[in-house]
Image (cartoon, grey):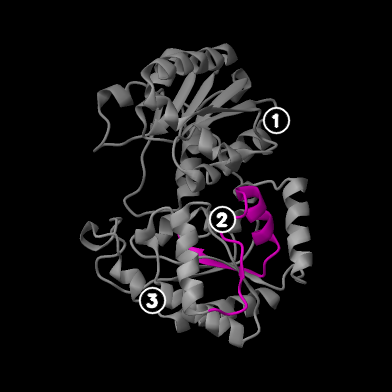
Amino acid sequence: MIEGYLKDKADFSQVQRVLVIKLQHLGDVLLTSPIYSNLKLQYPHLEVDALVYADTSCMLEGNPHISNVFSIDRDWKQNSRTKISREWQLFQLLKARNYQLIIGLTDRMRAAWLARLLKPTYSVAQKYPHKRGKFWCNSFSHLYSQPQNPRHTVETHLDALRRLGLYPQPQNKKLLMPITSTAEEKIDALLFAENLNPGSYIVIHPASRWMFKGWTTSGFAALLQGLAERKLPVIMVSGPDEAERSYVQSILQIQPTSTIDWSGQLSLLELASLISKASCFIGLDSVAMHIAAAVNTPCVALFGPSNEKSWHPWQVPHRILTRPFSCRPCGLDGCGNGKISDCLQAIQADEVIAATLALLKEVKT
């Protein structure tokens, strides 16, 4: 077998416990779910733990492939005495688990320190030639590189397993976000009150944590009008942040259609349940788009400065809308760091409507 050519592959028969470290944002954590699936499905004896920020742990809630989720509160740094105490408690918990493998899916130095202090048999992380030096590289038993041409973030994560000699199976690369019965029951009740059935409505999430990834209020208003003219019910959603809720209100003030507004009213698991029952999701490069992919709902996504090759809706029918600006994808927070991305503003509502209708037709046939 070709696997035999990798001389320094990990001997998973000698691995009992694994720690996966991903210290980033909500969508980033969700995109790690195939790591757990592949580890557990190929080696059922493994106990696989996660270390994430506390505000992102909900993305892994109920994942059957994870034994424990350990978390770091971003607020620890506000109080140095609290930080030292909590850090020590966390380290003792991790040390007690006696990991034989650490997988670092972050460029945070914490991954390097933990690989040194916990002393696993194997540890793997990505090379960061322009960001991390010898200390980083010497902290891990295995390092892996990324090609110059971008690939999806899920595949980038899975390269950590490939470097160890574990080759992911195609059927195990799906995102996973289990939905609780409590969330299902709440959404079913809300839809019943609106006289909506599963598959009869579209969910639009027009906001993002970083609004340089955002479209225009006038564009979303025109989109709402176009969908209303075609008798397609729409539910607008957003995160609980006041800026996101105000953004939704500014759209609805321009185009006060019969759109249902649930912005800021749903937890992430409730949002996942709502999207899972929708005929289509329309939104930006955001956690909501990745949730839609995880629950297998077709997506229409608008991309500007971020690279759709790395972040597109994973393994779900979708349409990507961009404009052919020579500078995109630039990865900047707006043109000239001005928080507004011209390439996104140039997308027309008619394009989004046409893409939505084409996608709905595709998934029905």
Residue 135 occupies which quadrant of the picture? top left
Which amino acid, by three-letter code, is at mark 1?
A: Pro
Q: Is residue 330 left or right of residue 107?
A: left
Residue 363 spot, x, y in % from top left:
66, 73
**Residue at (65, 50) in percent of width and height:** 171
Q: Choose the circle earlier in sequence order: 3 or 2.
A: 2
Is 160 above or below relative to 122?
below
**Residue at (38, 20) in percent of width and height:** 113
**C-alpha distance separating marks 1 and 2:** 39 Å
Q: Front-most of 244 and 291?
A: 244
Which amino acid, by three-letter code, is at mark 2?
A: Gly
The circle on residue 44 is 1
**C-alpha distance separating marks 1 and 3:** 47 Å
- Asked if residue 119 can be seen in this view, the reply is no
Which residue position is annotated with label 3? 347
**C-alpha distance separating marks 3 and 2:** 26 Å
Q: Quadrant of the C terminus?
A: bottom right
Q: Residue furthest bottom?
A: 229
Question: Which mark's residue is nearer the viewer, 1 or 2?
Answer: 2
Category of crowding for the residue at label 3, using alpha-carbon neighbours closer than 10 angstroms: few (below 14), some (14–19), many (at least 20): some
Residue 298 occupies which quadrant of the picture? bottom right
Is 146 above or below relative to 275?
above
Which residue position is annotated with label 2? 264
The magenta segment is 256-285
